[in-house]
Amino acid sequence: MEGLNKDWLTEGLIDFEYKKYMLLGYLKRVAKNFDENKLYPFLGELFAHYNNLIEFKRSKDEVARHFPSKLTKIDLQKMTLRYEELMNDDQYMEEIVQILDFAIPRLKKSMEAGIAIYDLVEEKIEIEPVGILPLHKEEGYMLLTNGNEKKIDVYGYQLTFFANAKENYRSIKTVFLTSYLRKLSNTVESIKLDMIRRHKQLPNPATYHIMSHMQFPLAETMLPVAKRSFVRYLGTAQ
């Protein structure tokens, strides 16, 4: 799907009608995917575009308060503003302001639609440990059941910890390993035992069953939401 460039506001022709056409076309494509419950990468893109425009508008207002000069160049990627007192760019900036005032509320509305879908998916997800858990839970298996699908997907997972000056973060890396048909003989416990037999480097792996009571698009919705929910679950289960 064709996306919206990060610098869409300032690249090319600075014209309200043209930028309006670009944005509405993009939001129409996003809405079509949201109608199909496909969240990613669209929801993340919306957050990035919205935050960029909010930050740009804030920076512009801050400069305007302290400097009586007029803006001459905008770099959205670097979030910098260049100004020159004698440069007459009122028409240019009026177009930018008009585009911002049009785009920000529409991006926000589209974000809210995506967040509502995300919340629905998260509500439908349950996470349960399988068997006895080891002390080391940073590596193991995720058994994923997606609504009424006739299979259980097995992913290996690894948690990574990193920190900055303010807080600690966790990220998760997953790799698809195999699938099992859903049948009476394939319980999550038996799947865990089979994985132990196949991968002897993890004799007692941390294993969790992540199940959804509704079926969602796997790559665009179910897997990314399940991974975020799982990381939060592990954080609270410590």
Image (spheres, helix red, strand yellow):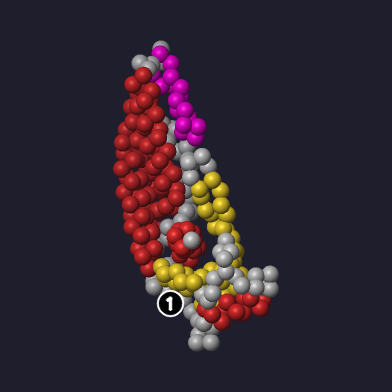
For residue 37, above or below residue 57: below
- Residue at 45% across, 25% down: 81
* Crowd tier of the residue under label 1, counting other residues whose Cα lies within 10 Å: few below 14, some 14–19, many 20 or above: few
Residue under label 1: 148
Q: Is residue 159 visible?
A: yes
Left/right of residue 43 with respect to residue 171 in the rendered view? left
Q: Position of residue 28 (x, y in %)?
A: 37, 52
Q: Residue 31: where, in percent of width, then height?
A: 37, 55
Q: Residue at x 42, y 74 (%)?
A: 147
**Amino acid of disc 1:** Asn
Q: Which region is colored magenta?
A: 70-85
Residue at the image point whose x is 49% and y is 72% from the top: 129
* Front in this rendered view, residue 111 or 197: 197
Look at 39% across and 73% down and name the residue there.
Answer: 213
129 and 176: which one is in front? Answer: 129
209, 70: nearer the viewer: 209
Residue 80 x %, y %: 47, 28
Depth check: give the residue in front, 74 or 126.
126
Q: What residue occupies the far right of the structure in this picture?
A: 201
Q: Residue furthest top?
A: 86
Compared to residue 140, the image places residue 24 above or below, namely: above
- In the rendered structure, the answer to whether residue 200 lies left or right of residue 102 reads right
